[in-house]
Structure formats: C-alpha cells, structure tokens
Image (cartoon, helix red, strand yellow):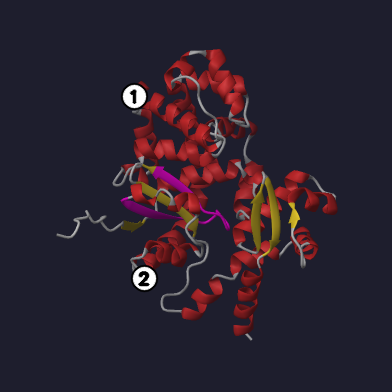
Amino acid sequence: MAELVRARPALKIEFLSSLGLDVLSTMGLVGIVQEFEGLDEWVVQAAASLPPRLRHDMQLCMRAGHYSYVVVEAVAEQVLQPGAAGHDDIKALLDDLRALSPEQCRSMVRAIILRTARHHDVELEQPIDDILADQERLEAVVSQLLIPIDTAELVQLFQEPTEWRDLLVSSMQRFWDRVYRDEYAAQQPGRERNVYYHRSHGYSTHFPDLFAAVTGRRVPDHIQERMDEVTTVRFVPSQYIGPYLSFLFNNGLLTVFYNSSVTPAEGDEQSERTQSLYQPLAALADKTRLQIMSLLHGRELYAQEIVNLLDIHQSAVSRHLKLMETAGVLTVRRDKGAKFYSINRQRIEDISSRLRELL
C-alpha cells in the first residue's frame, strides 16, 4: 500500500484595505524616513511637519522594537485579526487598544522584545518575564538590541506595559488628527481601486507566482522558509512604501504590505508591463546612485570601497545601496560579514527591453 501523506491545505489569499494596518504602517514609515531612500515624498513631508512632542512619542512607540514592523506585528496580534472593527474605523481601533488588559499589554511587550532579539541574533540568558522584572537586566538587553531611542524611557514603559499602550493610543490619535486624516481620505479611493483590481485578477494558485505578480518581486528567502506555518496571506496596499515590502507574522497569518501607488487599468496589458519599470527607474534617478552604477561598471566592490570612492557619509551610501538592491538593479554577495555589490545585468537588460517596447 502506498504511503499516505496528509495534503497541505491551499493557502487562503486575501486583498484587504485596512485602516488600522495602514495607520500603523504609515506611522512606522514616517519614523524611519531618514534611514531609507525611495519612500514616498508625502512620508518625507509628514516627518518634517511633526511637532517635536509627537515625533518623540511616536519614536518611543513605533521604534520600541528597533524596526516598526515588530510593533505593528504585536499590535495586530491583539486588535487587528481578520474581521476586527479596527480595519474600518479609527475609533474602534483606539477603543480596542484602550480595552487591552494589563496581561495583554505585557504580551505585546514580550513579543516586541523576543522578536527584536531574534532579528539581532541576541540570545536572552533569562526568561523574558525575569528580564522585565529586573531593571538592570532589561537595560542591558535593550542596549544589546540597538533600539534607537532613550534606553531609560523605554525601560520604564516596558516595565509598565499599560503606560506604553496609553502612549501608543495617544500618539495614534494625534497622528491621525494632525497629520493623516485628510491624507488617508484622499488616498483611500486609490487603495480600494487597487484591492478591487487584485481581487478580480485571475492569478496563479502557485504562491511564488502570485506573489511575483502582485509585488513584482520573488518571495524573500526568510519568508519562504516560514511558509509551511502559514495558512492565510493577506495583501495590504500602501501608498508610501516605495520599492520595499513589509511582512507581519501572526501565527498562521502572513500580512504583506506592498506598493499600491499605481494600479493598471483593468485589462490594460501595456500598463501592467510598464508598471514594473517604475521602481528600478526611480532607483536610478539620482546623481549619487548613477555614480554608484558607474563605479560598478564591469566589477564588484564591497560597501566600504564604494564609501571611500564616493567620499560621502557611510550611512548615506548604505541608504542608496539598500534602495538599489531592493529595486533589483544591484546584486549582493555576502562573504565573511562583508557585502559585495555588482550590477544586475539581467535586470538592466530587462529594463532596456521594456523601454524599447515603448518606442
């Protein structure tokens, strides 16, 4: 008799325009705008317009896990599961956050610390609750996690999780009222149009193909490695994320934030083909990034060599390289902790071919 194997259920795929996820994601993007090239110009302007107190409080909330997606993931686990009222209504979202119990708030803090520790390959030497109960231990862990905000303030909030929740609620309310309400309303029709387009499209049931069709990218290795634990994938449009993608893992639910700034007209194959040109051309439309392409002509350089040849600050070069890698115009080879960059010839040839089709 042949071996019996339990078949894995088909993935459930959803396209969702979510107010709650969008507000949290956008707050996170505003907080990291200085670290990433290529984010939408509105994010740059919004970051510059923040009152100092709101900027400080948003950083304390959204960078509590170093990267904002860690915080969004923890919050989504509690109040933005499928069907939650906060997907459609800001008041419902804030009310659900306010209603979280002290234990649920502690659970969010635990998740933020544990997720950030995994990201930085930091091994916690004590149980997480023991660390949270000991101020010195907690300060030491926070320092290891390279969280870019004041350690003393963050430790105080981590030890009083309901205060962190209250600061998050206050920051979200102020961000919504002072910065985002009108912008959200103006952009919502575009998000809804994008969701409708993808829902009505006849995509392949093979997830890597579907993912490539929606995002223009292949499934990242660190996501592919975890797909066995995923039962549902929800794609959430973002007007501001530029060439980047962002991911949340909530048990069997994978959330993918993708760029929705351009939606092809339904049935317009030419528009669909040319849409893929936008991100790589945007990645090249900069004097410094064109200099990098010139430096890499016919050779491979590691990051510090590029910094030395350009004679500009390392953090600025890193932002440019990250954008060019994300857009696919550069390839990266890692060797003994160093990153070596070269031009992605196939990608550039594909871009040239697409441009020739327009002639």
Is any part of residue 245 visible from this angle? yes
Image coords of residue 214 (percent x, y): 45, 64
Callout 2: SS = loop
At label 2, which amino acid type do we have? His
Image coords of residue 60 (percent x, y): 56, 30
> Is residue 288 toward the left or the right of residue 162 in the image?
right
In the displayed structure, 169 sits above or below 240; it is above
Observer-side mark, 1 or 2, equals 2
Circle 1 residues within 10 Å: few <14, some 14–19, many ≥20: few
Q: Which residues are magenta?
A: 231-249
Q: Nearer the viewer, residue 114 or 261?
A: 114
At label 1, which amino acid type do we have? Ser
Q: Dot 1 corresponds to which residue?
A: 101
Is any part of residue 88 visible from this angle? no
Contact between labelled residues 2 and 1, with CB atoms less than 8 Å apart: no
Q: Dot 2 corresponds to which residue?
A: 201
Which of pointers 1 and 2 lies earlier in the amino acid sequence?
1
Circle 2 residues within 10 Å: few <14, some 14–19, many ≥20: few
Q: Nearer the viewer, residue 137 or 155?
A: 137
